[in-house]
Amino acid sequence: DKDLRDQKNLMLKEEKREDLMPVVEDDLGTNIYTGFTLISFNEIKQLLDAGIVNLRIDGIFHDVEWLCDVITMYQDVVDGKLDPMNAEENYKEKYPSDAASDGFWHTNTILVK
């Protein structure tokens, strides 16, 4: 009976994982997010080489300053102004409280329950 639309404080915890996953219901349905920020500085050039022309950076749980900063970091990596490893280190130093990981790129995400 409670209206849960657009609330960003609802979380799910999967039985075999430690992190909490934010759940947001909006006009399009129910969205379940990872419990971490997926960073792709080391993978961005491979995506471009594979023909990917659009990349979505979702800032739903961050502010506009964060979003602009991250877009600049990715652009600097693409333009060769910033080494991907340095971008990742810079990100983690600048946002130490943000649980950032490249987890989905290099980890098997299928866990047996």
Image (cartoon, grey):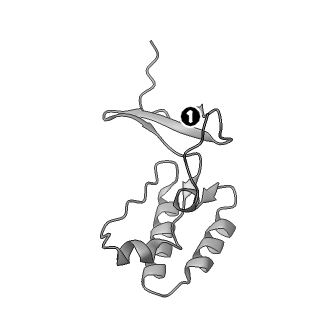
**The quadrant where residue 97 appears:** bottom right
Q: Position of residue 69 (x, y in %)?
A: 51, 69
Q: In this rendering, would 55 be left or right of 68?
A: left
Residue 37 x %, y %: 56, 55
Between 17 and 8, the residue placed more toward the observer is 17
- Residue extending farthest to the front is 112
Q: Residue furthest bottom?
A: 81
Residue type, numbered disc 1: Asn
Residue at 61% in and 78% down: 85
Q: Position of residue 82 (x, y in %)?
A: 54, 84
- 57 on left or right of 109: left
Q: Nearer the viewer, residue 106 or 74?
A: 106
Name the residue carrying label 1. Answer: 9
In percent of the image, x 55 and y 49: which residue is there? 109
Q: Is residue 47 above or below residue 3?
A: below
Q: Is residue 92 left or right of residue 45?
A: right
How far from the left and from the top, in percent, is residue 3?
43, 20
Secondary element at image label 1 = loop
Q: How many marks?
A: 1
The N terminus: image quadrant: top left
Badge 1: residue crowd in 10 Å (few <14, some 14–19, many ≥20): few
